[in-house]
Amino acid sequence: MRKYLTEIYLMHSIHGAAGALIGIFIPIYLLNLKFSLAQIIVYYFIYSAAVFLFSFFSGWLSLKIGLKGIVILSFPFLLGHIGTLYLLSYGFQTPLFAIAVLNGIQAAFYWFPLHLFFSRHSEIDSMGDQVARFFAWPKLAGILAPLIGAGIVAFGGFQLLILTAGLIYMASIVPLIYIPEFSLKIDFRFKKFISLFKRNTRYFFVEIAENIREDAEGILWPIFVFLTLQKVLSVGLVGTLAGIGSIIFTFLVGRYADKTNKKHLMKIAALMMALIWFARFYFPNEIVFYLSALLTGFFAILLAVPFTSIMYGLAKTKESEIEEFILFREIPVFLGRALLYTIVLFLIANFKYFLLFTAFSHAIFFFY
């Protein structure tokens, strides 16, 4: 079964390269179209809610058409999301909440099968190394993507960037052909999820913190860099530096995580990440932004690889509950994102204070 990890890595790498090309520029694009910061934050809140709700629908539908069918079904919604974004600049004003829902559906239909494919084909004894590759190959494929994306915007506009990303996304369907299908059985009863919560309470709350960190770094931080420096190229450079920092470190962390205490690694990384967020708040200048992006590449991986290894390990604890655990995980994922965006909306007039909130949120990792 392990041989199919190559196909999973390849599909995820192509998909990740397209995401790296366009993802951090979507809020910048919306700002340039005169959407307010509050509207953009609401967009990501709705997106997160749609991912949560449609993940459960994705689970139910996968029983009917299979996991590969769900991944294929994600592409019409992905193209709908990209297409409606593209048309905004030509005056076709699709409501922003509808665009967010399209994005949430495609994400739910992509990530639920991907998590299950990886869970089924990975091995607990070498989980750290396999998770590292799961992180590293998409980053390697898209390491220059943010900088390339910034160049495309500078010379061809956001419309060309959106079209380019759409074509790369479509190419990610090819490796899916070679990944075998497997049968599913999902227990949707409420008491099943209560049971999973009771057995994984600490994990539940740490997953909330992990998703605060992820969305703060991937969504809010590029917005802050753009609003502070007013340079699209700076956003691309920050993204690329983070990629360089992580790619150097990822394989080493993966192998080391299999041989040491994963929770100790997470606590060291959480402390360093908190210090980086404090530095961003108290020293908001270009040099600190670039240096912190490079350091984040190191320490975010030191945090994410052990934690994700633990997550997939928990999913595989009971082979009969993998599907339910992946769905259960969506609850703290949504709660973390919802908490972050709700607080940011309250702080919208003092946007930079999300940096402090993110720094303090890393304290939760010390209780795991």
Image (tube, rainbow, N blue to C red):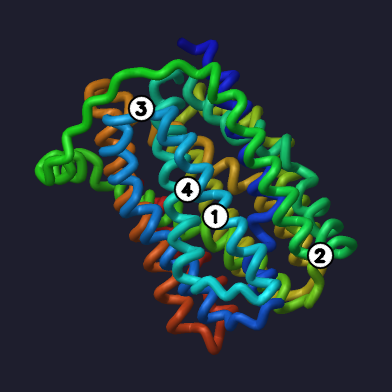
Task: Name the front one of labels 4 and 2.
Answer: 2
Q: Residue furthest bottom?
A: 349
Element on which disc 4 rests: helix
Give whichever of discs 4 and 2 has the lower sequence position.
4
Residue at 45% across / 20% down in the picture? 122
Which residue is located at x 65 percent, y 76 percent? 91
**Callout 4: few (<14), some (14-19), or many (20+) C-alpha neighbours within 10 Å?**
many
**Amino acid type, callout 2:** Gly
Residue occupying image coordinates x 30% and y 37%: 61
Along the viewing direction, whichever of 271 and 347 lies nearer the viewer: 347
* Mark 1 and mark 4: Cα distance apart in space: 12 Å
Q: Residue 48, position in %: x, y?
A: 42, 59
Which residue carries the number 2 mark? 157
Q: Secondary structure at mark 3?
A: loop
Q: Name the residue carrying label 3.
A: 66
| Residue type, numbered disc 4 | Ala
Q: Which residue is mark 4?
A: 107
Question: Relative to residue 359, is residue 133 drawn left or right?
Answer: right
Horizontal arrangement in the rendering, residue 301 relative to residue 149 (left or right): left
Task: Specify few, some or many for label 3: CA neighbours under 10 Å numbering under 14, 14-19, or 20 or more.
Answer: some
Vertical relation: 14 (above or below) 334: above
Q: Closer to the camera, 155 or 361?
A: 155
The first of marks 2 and 3 along the sequence is 3
Please identify the quarter of the rendering in which residue 250 is found. top right
The mark found on residue 80 in the picture is: 1
Q: Residue at x 70, y 72 (%)?
A: 90
Q: Is residue 129 visible?
A: no
Look at the numbered disc 2 and give the secondary structure of its residue: helix
**Which of 128/268 is in front?**
128
Mark positioned earlier in the residue sequence (3 or 1):
3
For marks 4 and 2, give the CA distance.
Answer: 25 Å
